Amino acid sequence: MRASLITTCLAATLANVASGAAISKHELLDASNDHESAKEPVKKLIAEIQQGLIDELSKRGPDAACNLDKVVYRREYGDLTREERLDYVRAMQCMMDAPAKTPASVSPGAKNRFDDFVVTHIQQTFTAHYSGNFQAWHRWFMHSWEKALRDECGYKGYQPKLIGRTKQYWDWSKYAEAPQDSPIFNGEDDSMGGNGEYLPDFPNSVIVLPEGVTGDDIELPRGLGGGLVTKGPFANMTVNLGPYAALHDTAPNPQADGLGYNPRPLKRDVGPAMNMRYANASTLWNLLHKPNIKEYRLLLEGPFNTGEIGPHGGGHYTINLCSGDPGGDFWTAPAEPAFYLHHGMMDRMWSLWQAIDPETRHVDLDAGAYGHRTWNNEPPSPLTSLDDTIDMGYVGEGSVIREQMSTIDGPHCYLYK
Ligand SMILES: *[C@@H]1O[C@H](CO)[C@@H](O)[C@H](O)[C@H]1NC(C)=O
Ligand SMILES: *[C@@H]1O[C@H](CO)[C@@H](O)[C@H](O)[C@H]1NC(C)=O
Ligand SMILES: [Cu+2]
């Protein structure tokens, strides 16, 4: 199964790589003006959908479990105040300092509370991606993260109307031309840490098509880092788990399941190429116009075994495919501090898309091959149902998919700004 997502780092030296020149912002924009021209229409469309959600909540009475008075908002990371960002960083570091709940017999690599989340994700990667529970599972995973931050680390970002809960998100389109300079990766003390140190001789990212699949491999310019993260709160952070997939220059995990202890420093190669190619403003526009969950998922994640990886893959791999460690490894991705901002955006887009046609989109899970219990229905499995359970392992309580279909019903009461 590993083969289906194989990516390699071609030891290529394209002219711009050898000379160390950064990819030009204009080169990318000139390739297509979609991103630029989609920015305003997307903003308007999202504002309209959000207004609809507010109207809906304002019709609910004072006794409703979720209404306009109770709802909380999750905001874009760059839109938080400095104090809010610092509190988020502090709470995440507190999770890294707290003991793991996962027993060493389950995962010798789980060294702290932050790692518990990585373990659960690695264990369930093949049933929680390209599968029917993908979005519901990650919505609950995010909720569990937020709850642990609040209950175990005193995270304050939960007061209604003052501060969004976590699920601060990263609007992919907002910094697509230069994500390395965004408030998320700029290396300031209120960021998720800086880019990796710039390594001049560094491979590009190549998405290799599996044998038998027609089309060309997709090669994208490397990012502007490649080495260790040396700035910001997560400089010198130790990654304990994974990788599961092969990463450039990273020793394999001592266990085949990726759960062994493999301490190493955080690495990134953040840059615009991946972000612009897969997660620009026109991508958001296209996503919001998909007529059903099957087509939505096909754009979000790309058709299986093709070079298209959609904004889900594009956001992950903006940290970089081959050298982002652990950001480039699908399985170990939650060990990358920016993971939760990326999946906040995933959850935001799903909730906005759902709100366009709630009657259908809060119940319809059939996403074709992506609607089954296993990854791309391999090995063949039943379709996911709303009654299927969600297991969070040592992270926290489980749930049921039905409870995850709306952000303003069941256990949830939040909107995105
Ligand atoms: C990271 O580690 C290096 C080498 O041990 C040290 O020189 C540097 O000050 C550390 N940086 C931070 C931000 O802790
Ligand atoms: C923006 O994303 C779309 C996919 O949603 C892609 O087809 C297009 O080429 C991207 N634009 C740029 C400038 O890369
Ligand atoms: Cu995931």
Image (cartoon, rainbow, N blue to C red):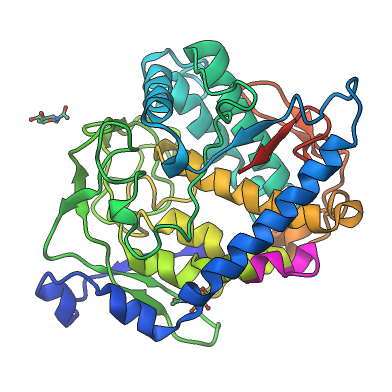
**Would you identify the image quadrant in which residue 414 lies?**
top right
Q: Tell me if 397 is positioned left or right of 20 in this view.
A: right
Residue 14: x, y in percent?
Answer: 19, 80
Residue closest to the eye, 315 or 219: 315
The residue under the point 50% across, 47% down is 342
Q: Tell me if 63 is positioned left or right of 407 in this view.
A: right
The residue under the point 63% across, 25% down is 393
Q: Is residue 332 in view from this perspective?
A: no
Report if residue 50 lies within the magenta region: no
**Would you identify the image quadrant in which residue 394 lies?**
top right
Residue closest to the eye, 124 or 140: 140
Residue 234: x, y in percent?
Answer: 28, 32
Residue 47: x, y in percent?
Answer: 67, 55
Q: Would you say the magenta stretch is mainly helix, strand or loop?
A: helix
Q: Quadrant of the N terminus?
A: bottom right
Residue 70: x, y in percent?
Answer: 75, 24
Q: Tell me if 104 is positioned left or right of 411 in this view.
A: left
Residue closest to the eye, 327 or 74: 74
If the picture is divided into quarters, which one holds ligand 1?
A: top left
Image height of 8 relative to 142, above or below: below
Q: Is residue 96 in view from this perspective?
A: yes
Q: What is the magenta range?
A: 286-295
Report if residue 291 lies within the magenta region: yes
Q: Quadrant of the C terminus?
A: top right
Q: Tell me if 204 is positioned left or right of 215 in this view.
A: left
Residue closest to the eye, 417 or 408: 417
The residue under the point 55% across, 27% down is 163
